[in-house]
Amino acid sequence: GTRRTEVADALAEARSHGDLSENAEYDEARNEQARLEDEIKKLEYTLEHAEIISTLSSDTVSTGCGVILSRAEFNGQPQKIETLQIVGRSEADYENHKISDDSPIGKAVLGKRVGDTFIVEAPIGIMTFTVLEISSTGVFENHPEG
């Protein structure tokens, strides 16, 4: 059976032990039931609001793609190669190189092709990027960092 059924059975078992005010098994089962129901609600919400994105081509950058960008020298910082994955807002995780398609760089890179150069106006100035490589799966064999 499912975890949901197991928890319901555990609750019935705990109830059969009589006085629920001092029944640790019952409290534990109720807490587990609440946690599972919360997780189910979150998953149902995600499914209801999911957007199906088809990546038919890796010619242009789209949400879900991986992209290797070269950032031109900027504010005295040397040229830098960055490997990023363009993701939906809820998946964005900058430390893991996942940027939102709604972020300044994400918006600017969508639709670009290998070799395209684009600029991003950031609070710290204007940055220039060039698309070096695109992966429709978001994964690259040789993963340059830096």
Image (cartoon, rainbow, N blue to C red):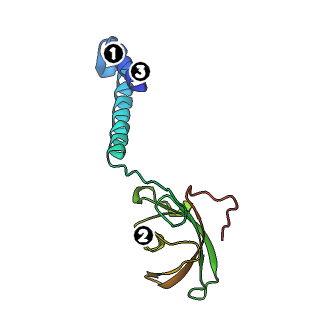
The answer to the question of whether label 2 and label 3 lie on touching residues, with beta carbons closer than 8 A, is no
Residue 136 location, x and y as percent? 55, 58
Which labelled disc corresponds to residue 114? none
Residue at 60% x, 88% y: name it: 76
Closest to the observer, 43 or 107? 107
Residue type of the residue flagged with mark 2: Ser
Residue type of the residue flagged with mark 1: Ala
Foreground disc of the pair 1, 2: 2
Kindly indicate the quadrant of the structure image that contains residue 59.
Answer: bottom right
Q: Residues within 10 Å of mark 2 (few under 14, many from 20)?
A: some
Closest to the observer, 86 or 75? 86
Labels 1 and 2: the sequence-earlier one:
1
Q: Which residue is mark 3?
A: 6
Give the structural element (helix, strand or loop) at label 1: helix
Residue at 58% x, 72% y: name it: 114
Residue at 29% x, 21% y: name it: 21
Q: Which residue is mark 2?
A: 103
Q: CA distance from mark 1 to mark 2?
A: 50 Å
Labels 2 and 3: the sequence-earlier one:
3
Q: Is residue 6 above or below residue 126?
A: above
Residue 28 location, x and y as percent? 39, 27
Closest to the observer, 137 or 27? 137
Residue 72 location, x and y as percent? 59, 83
Kindly indicate the quadrant of the structure image that contains residue 35.
Answer: top left
Labels 3 and 1: the sequence-earlier one:
3
Q: Which residue is mark 1?
A: 12
Q: Quadrant of the N terminus?
A: top left
Q: CA distance from mark 3 to mark 1?
A: 10 Å
Closest to the observer, 121 or 65? 65
Give the structural element (helix, strand or loop) at label 3: helix
Give the structural element (helix, strand or loop) at label 2: loop
Q: CA distance from mark 2 to mark 3?
A: 43 Å
